[in-house]
Amino acid sequence: MLKEKVKELLEMGLEEDPSLFLIDFTVSPDNKIKVVIDGDAGVTVNDCIKISRAIEHNLDREEEDFSLEVASAGATAPMVMPRQYKKNIGRKLEVETSGSSFEGKLTQANDEYIVLEWKAREPKPVGKGKVTVQKREEIPFSDIKKAKVVLKF
């Protein structure tokens, strides 16, 4: 019952800011509520507070005791929704498919696939030595096993 009530409040809270979307939502047997959100333009602490209040202020602790955690998807957390790729266009990604893995700049993302581009050194077609070539890979979401942003320090 608590889970349904929280889900309803969460959906109402997210409706107030269409740039935010749900990544994960759980309620443990001991009423620990965990919500993970992401946003088209990232997630601020205020966004987390806003969602937290939308839930907490509409539940009665006298009725049922609970703990609540609202967090943003971490920068190194694997992406799970096509919408997350769109906000990361221009960033370097590491993508695993069943047959191979790719690392490159995300240049395109739609509802069916992403496009990664990178430069690679390959042997010259004729003669000795290597030449730098531009590579491009179109990867359907159905083929992606794991994808995450590569952070540079």
Image (spheres, helix red, strand yellow):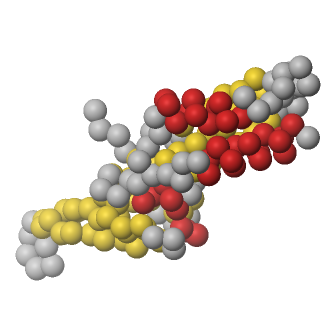
Between residue 101 and residue 153, name the one nearer to us. 153
Is 52 drawn above or below residue 78 in the view shown? above
Which quadrant holds residue 134? Answer: bottom left
What residue is shown at x 45% (from left), y 70% (from top)?
A: 110
Quadrant of the snapshot with the N terminus: top right
Q: Residue at x 52, y 36 (%)?
A: 47
Q: Residue furthest bottom?
A: 126
Q: Which image quadrant for residue 90?
A: bottom left
User: Where residue 77 sits: x, y (%)?
Assistant: 52, 41
* Number of numbered tags placed on the structure image: 0
What residue is rendered at 36% in x and 67% in y? 108
Q: Report if residue 140 is visible in the image.
A: no
Q: Position of residue 14 (x, y in %)?
A: 62, 47
Q: Position of residue 141 (x, y in %)?
A: 54, 67
Asked whether 116 or 112 is in front, the reply is 112
Q: In this rendering, is residue 3 above or below 141?
A: above
**Is residue 90 visible from the viewing direction of this image?**
yes
Residue 75 vs residue 34, the one in the foreground: 34
Q: Identify the residue at image location x=58%, y=48%.
A: 16
Q: Quadrant of the C terminus?
A: top left
> Where does residue 68 sit, x and y in percent of width and height?
71, 27
Q: Toward which corner of the image does residue 34 lie, by quadrant?
A: top right
Horizontal relation, residue 109 to residue 37: left or right:
left
